[in-house]
Image: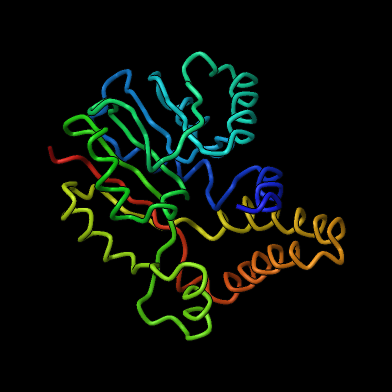
């Protein structure tokens, strides 16, 4: 990954769309967690949702991300909030985790699953869940199967495997889970918590890297992404999937 990409995203309060209320809403769908659950937060970034999970439970959380500066920021945030004793921060690759089988009652991942794809993540993470444990994820999906050609062409370049949200239901069942619930993230999760701060950071980087074609090649697609969402947000967005291990 280009260093500028990380420079941009390290400056953001969230590394993708999301909001505390949606994290809490998804957590509220989990009806029978143990009193002190073991939780794994995969692709945690700087941990906005990690802090919400720590507030909502008295369990222990392992927060994992591959980028060390995100983990360092998370550690500082947890210390300020008083959660450092219940959250273990780990630098690691979501595709090569070495946790023991059946280690967790809940696996959580907001906006990071695209790195592996739904099917591979569902299959490879399943061994880490205890019987009847929960997997909760949010990631990008089509809300409608008939999107305009312009936005289809855009995603053909940036995310060619983007799936219709209902197709994920079948994948959940076929990989050994039971769908508990689904809901889309609201538009405010994109504008207030992601694109508004991103717009400010991109403006700063355009000035800093003026005349640098390689930098503009990173900045311009992010600006285009924002414009695509402004025009076509009715057709795609983040879906939150709450599922339970059937074995």
116 vs 31, left or right, is: right
* Colouring: rainbow
- In this view, the residue farthest toward the top is 85
Residue 108 at x, y = what percent?
Answer: 38, 38
Residue 145 at x, y = what percent?
Answer: 35, 77
User: In the rendered image of this protein, does residue 50 appear above or below residue 201?
Assistant: above
54 vs 73, left or right, is: left
48 vs 167, left or right, is: right
- Please name the residue shown 28% across and 28% down the image: 105
User: In the rendered image of this protein, does residue 87 appear above or below residue 217?
Assistant: above
User: In the rendered image of this protein, does residue 1 appear above or below residue 127?
Assistant: below
In this rendered view, identify the residue nearer to me: 155 or 146.
Answer: 155
Q: Quadrant of residue 206?
A: bottom right
In this rendered view, identify the residue nearer to me: 12 or 33.
Answer: 12
- Please name the residue shown 59% across and 73% down the image: 228
Residue 67 at x, y = what percent?
Answer: 57, 38
- Please name the residue shown 12% across and 37% down the image: 247
Q: In which quarter of the image is residue 239?
A: bottom left
Q: How many labels does the image show?
A: 0
User: In the rendered image of this protein, does residue 125 appear above or below residue 196?
Assistant: above
Residue 208 at x, y = what percent?
Answer: 86, 55
24 vs 124, left or right, is: right
- In this view, the residue farthest toward the bottom is 149
């Amino acid at each position: 990954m280009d260093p500028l990409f990380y420079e941009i995203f390290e400056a953001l309060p969230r590394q993708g769309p999301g909001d505390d209320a949606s994290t809490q809403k998804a957590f509220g769908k989990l009806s029978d967690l143990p009193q002190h659950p073991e939780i794994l937060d995969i692709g945690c970034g700087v941990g906005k949702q990690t802090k919400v999970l720590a507030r909502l439970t008295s369990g222990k959380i392992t927060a994992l991300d591959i980028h060390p500066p995100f983990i360092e920021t998370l550690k500082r945030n947890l210390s300020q909030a008083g959660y450092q004793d219940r959250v273990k921060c780990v630098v690691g690759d979501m595709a090569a985790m070495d946790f023991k089988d059946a280690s967790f009652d809940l696996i959580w991942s907001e906006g990071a699953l695209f790195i592996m794809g739904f099917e591979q993540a569902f299959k490879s993470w399943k061994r880490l869940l205890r019987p009847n444990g929960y997997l909760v994820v949010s990631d990008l999906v089509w809300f409608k199967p008939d999107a305009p050609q312009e936005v289809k062409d855009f995603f053909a370049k940036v995310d060619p495997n983007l799936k219709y949200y209902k197709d994920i239901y079948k994948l959940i069942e076929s990989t050994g889970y039971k769908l508990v619930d689904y809901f889309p993230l609201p538009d405010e999760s994109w504008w207030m918590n992601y694109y508004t701060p991103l717009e400010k950071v991109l403006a700063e980087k355009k000035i800093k890297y003026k005349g640098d074609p390689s930098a503009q090649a990173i900045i311009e697609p992010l600006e285009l992404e924002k414009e695509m969402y402004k025009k076509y947000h009715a057709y795609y967005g983040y879906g939150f999937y709450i599922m339970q291990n059937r074995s």
